[in-house]
Image (cartoon, rainbow, N blue to C red):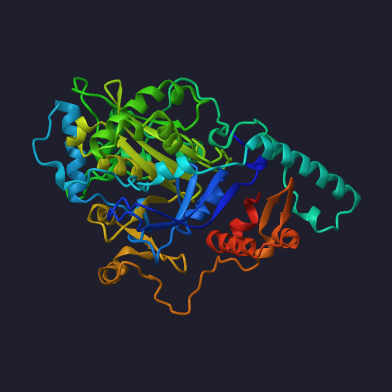
């Protein structure tokens, strides 16, 4: 896993213009429209900034809907886990799971009132075909060699004079060599992860607590021990470390999300459910050993739920879509114990995987990517259950790093009944597609009833504060050299080149344009 101080920059390859493909929501054959780029590698900081500007990833393909032109506008939605309270229907799902685990009871009711797919069901239908046809001619071995040569050349220039403009744009040579020196092609970038002993982290139990957090709660725990209702003993019986979200034992107080999820099971329970957090990396032993079982589950899900043909959900598609991530695994000292990056949350029931939630853990959020599960367990409403588990997980991570306080549910599509359920996880916000500020969903719904596309920011004078203001500072990697766009454009004669780069800058914003390397060939 890369150290915090040795991170190298993101490397992206932007595709000019817009992509048209079949919409997975309204089924319009060419109505879905988006901008896209291929992320050879990406830092979690950059991806956090990008999703806060309406971008989303599908494997290593990162796309942004053209909101005022696409047939079904997709608004980024985020939930506030710290203020989240499960609704009556959410509690029903959690109690249904508990009854199944304890007594083996199978719900005989109709499950159609619960969404088939969780908040992760966001990948555009055309992604598989789109990614397969992308002709990524940029080989990372060549990139790595070129970057090394470029950096050596720039270092020599820096020794001669520190005032030259080009030499001001140098980046960490060692970090780039670590990322690109493997000589692997773009679809299989090596991800560095910390070796983990044994199996992946068991999320059926709250994570280990830091000493500082335990000290902060000592007074609370003493009071809990003296509680005649036995709150503290209840935690001990569950084998849990007390949480910052304490149990509410009084009859007039509702149970918390943690109470409902982590309720203790009797020794003779019919089933055992274990949730493991596994890094998305073929270097991780747990990910590698469970790959075939996870893949088989994915095929079963895609063919049953989405009626995919066998050749549409093969191992290549599965790997590109859900096992290939551009995110660099990072483990800063002030971050969560599991680090940042891409992960699979595996739901193990009695020793076999019945569901996998694909998530990204970023500096400010847990971001849902996709969910696939065994259709034979649809009666457990695994889409809703996994979303609630991920909200609880975000709360746990917040205890370790206070800046991580959101749960991103992907896209909210008001014009698609299937996707409107995401608005039930409250409080939540939608991202304004013009000014990129967050607006409470309650303030957006009336506008969306009147128009598919809406500007949520009610201030007519408000603008995109993160917009590209100095495009000449954008970073470009071109002909074995890293340079600001102001230098690069002096060598260009094609007028369309400037339009492409300017479009890219406007979409990613000033901050990302200065940090990420835009590959130009």
Say above or below: 349 vs 424.
above
In which quadrant of the rendered view does residue 205 lie?
Answer: top left
Report the residue at 31% width, 66% height from top: 452
Say above or below: 195 vs 320.
above
- Residue found at the very far bottom of the displayed protein: 461
- Residue 74 placed where, x, y %? 36, 58
Q: Is 91 left or right of 293, judged from the image as shown? A: left
- Residue found at the very far right of the displayed protein: 160
In which quadrant of the rendered view does residue 5 lie?
Answer: top right
Question: Can residue 49 be seen here?
Answer: yes
Of 94 and 484, which appears nearest the observer? 484
Say above or below: 498 vs 78.
below
Of 460 and 38, which appears nearest the observer? 38
Report the residue at 19% width, 23% height from top: 269
Count of marks, rendered view? 0
In which quadrant of the rendered view does residue 375 lie?
Answer: top left
- Residue 325 placed where, x, y %? 49, 39
- Residue 150 placed where, x, y %? 77, 44
Looking at the rendered image, the quarter that the N terminus falls into is top right
Question: Can residue 219 be seen here?
Answer: no
Report the residue at 82% width, 44% height from top: 153
């Amino acid at each position: 896993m890369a150290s915090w101080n040795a991170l190298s920059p993101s490397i992206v390859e932007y595709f000019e213009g817009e992509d048209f493909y079949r919409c997975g929501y309204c089924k319009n054959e060419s109505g879905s429209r988006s901008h896209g780029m291929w992320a050879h590698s990406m830092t979690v900081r950059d991806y956090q900034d990008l999703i806060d500007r309406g971008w989303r990833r599908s494997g290593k393909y990162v796309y942004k809907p053209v909101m005022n032109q696409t047939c079904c506008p997709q608004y980024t939605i985020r939930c506030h886990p710290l203020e989240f309270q499960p609704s009556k229907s959410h509690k029903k799902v959690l109690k249904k799971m508990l009854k199944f685990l304890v007594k083996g009871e199978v719900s005989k009711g109709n499950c159609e009132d619960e969404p088939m797919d969780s908040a992760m069901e966001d990948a555009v239908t055309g992604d598989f075909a789109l990614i397969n046809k992308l002709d990524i001619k940029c080989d990372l071995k060549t990139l790595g060699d070129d970057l090394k040569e470029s950096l050596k050349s720039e270092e020599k220039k820096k020794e001669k004079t520190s005032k030259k403009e080009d030499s001001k744009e140098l980046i960490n040579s060692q970090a780039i060599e670590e990322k690109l020196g493997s000589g692997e092609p773009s679809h299989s970038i090596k991800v560095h992860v910390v070796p983990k002993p044994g199996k992946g982290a068991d999320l059926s139990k709250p994570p280990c607590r830091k000493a500082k957090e335990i000290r902060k709660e000592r007074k609370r725990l003493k009071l809990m021990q003296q509680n005649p209702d036995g709150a503290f003993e209840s935690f001990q019986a569950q084998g849990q470390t007390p949480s910052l979200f304490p149990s509410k034992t009084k009859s007039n107080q509702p149970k918390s999300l943690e109470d409902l999820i982590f309720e203790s099971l009797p020794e003779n329970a019919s089933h055992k459910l274990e949730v493991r957090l596994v890094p998305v990396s073929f270097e991780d032993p747990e990910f590698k050993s469970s790959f075939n079982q996870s893949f088989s589950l994915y095929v079963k899900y895609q063919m049953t739920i989405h009626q995919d043909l066998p050749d549409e959900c093969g191992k290549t598609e599965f790997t590109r879509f859900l096992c290939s991530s551009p995110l660099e695994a990072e483990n800063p000292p002030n971050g969560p114990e599991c680090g940042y990056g891409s992960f699979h949350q595996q739901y193990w029931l009695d020793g076999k995987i019945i569901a996998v939630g694909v998530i990204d853990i970023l500096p400010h959020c847990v971001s849902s990517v996709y969910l696939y599960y065994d259709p034979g367990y649809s009666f457990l409403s695994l889409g809703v259950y996994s979303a609630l588990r991920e909200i609880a997980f975000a709360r746990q991570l917040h205890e370790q790093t206070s800046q991580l306080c959101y749960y991103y549910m992907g896209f909210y599509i008001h014009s698609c009944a299937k996707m409107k359920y995401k608005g039930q996880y409250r409080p939540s916000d939608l991202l304004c597609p013009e000014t990129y500020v967050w607006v409470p969903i309650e303030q957006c719904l009336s506008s969306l009833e009147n128009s598919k596309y809406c500007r949520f920011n009610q201030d007519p004078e408000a603008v995109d504060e993160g917009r590209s203001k100095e495009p000449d500072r954008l970073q470009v990697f071109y002909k074995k050299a890293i340079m600001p766009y102001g230098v690069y454009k002096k060598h260009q004669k094609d007028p369309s080149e400037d339009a492409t780069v300017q479009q890219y800058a406007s979409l990613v914003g000033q901050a990302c344009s200065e940090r990420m390397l835009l590959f130009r060939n």
